[in-house]
Image (cartoon, rainbow, N blue to C red):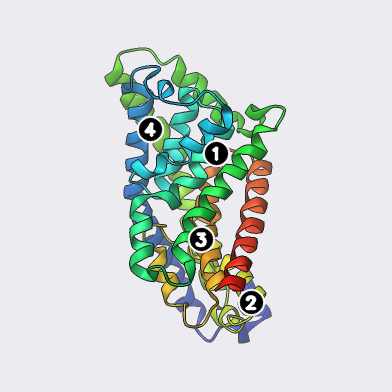
Amino acid sequence: MFLIDWLAPSLYPATLSTRAQDGLTLAISVLIESLPFVVLGVVLSIVVQVWVPPGLIERWMPRRAWARRAMLSLLGMIVPVCECGNVPFARGLLMRGFSVPETMTFLIAAPIVNPIVIITTHQAFGFSDGILVARILGGYAIANLIGWLYSRHPSPDALLTDRFRDTCELVTHEPGGKGRRTLAQFVVELRAVMPALVIGSALAGAVQVLIPRDALLAIGSNPALSIVAMMALAMVVSICSNVDAFFALSFASTFTPGSIVAFLLVGPLVDVKMLALMRTTFTWRTLGGIVVVVVLSAFAIGTAVNLLA
């Protein structure tokens, strides 16, 4: 902020101290909004790893790989957490033995097929301009596309960080009963995701303050640029997917329907907070690939909505 103030002071009418305070407030709000879902996700992760009997979940899974991914991408409909809590839950699936592509499919689809997200999106937009349908079907399609692409990887375990693989080994050989394993895993998961959540929240607050909002609003009526602008905004503001539809509604009169859809697809999947959390499990190269697929797919879906609306 000091450097930008010195090089381009005319960009921001507010003083540095005011913007710093705004950035801190935004960062804390993102952290507070996300924390309950992260804790819930950790608890659900432990339930899956420690308390669900071996083979119970797997018994209900289809044998074909594409069918398993398709079913796992719908698992978010019965897991009432937003994207923040889905990361520790996905880590639990990996530790239980699900493959990396299968877990990715769940992780990408869950924040959008979540029933709370569907309800709030309907409350905000109804069925107007196909925004709700495009969000649900688009999120499901993107998740399965990513799962299929990474299923072609010659060594899926290479998509994971060394630290996470070491954690899997530690959890697998954890001695003691279920109570001790529950406590140990709770500590391990919180130590893994909390620093990432704090860093991601801080980045979200800082970027929101540093990027002039007027620059985004100025291009809202352009069919292509509006999609790009709203995707950039989605990655920056890091709003929980349970309520992001109401935030997007404030832009509906200025931006195209396709750009609103792109915002609702990109935000829950690859905003800066979500990327920081996913970095606890996946390598930077893997995250880069996910971002490219999500952004290109969201742009294509947004363009299609603009043409049809």
- Mark 4 in CB contact with mark 2 (< 8 angstroms): no
SS state under label 1 = helix
Which of 273 and 195 lies nearest the eye of the viewer?
A: 273
Foreground mark, 1 or 4, reads 1
Q: Which residue is mark 2?
A: 223
- Residue 245, compared with residue 74, is above or below; it is below
Separation (CA) of disc 4 from disc 2: 41 Å
SS state under label 2 = helix
Does label 2 or label 3 sit earlier along the sequence? 3
Which of 6 and 152 lies nearest the eye of the viewer?
A: 152
* Percent coordinates x, y for residue 57 in the rendering: 39, 24
Does label 4 or label 3 sit earlier along the sequence? 4
Amino acid type, residue under disc 1 in the picture: Met
- Mark 4 in CB contact with mark 3 (< 8 angstroms): no
Which of 65 and 281 lies nearest the eye of the viewer?
A: 65
Quadrant of the image occupied by residue 218: bottom right
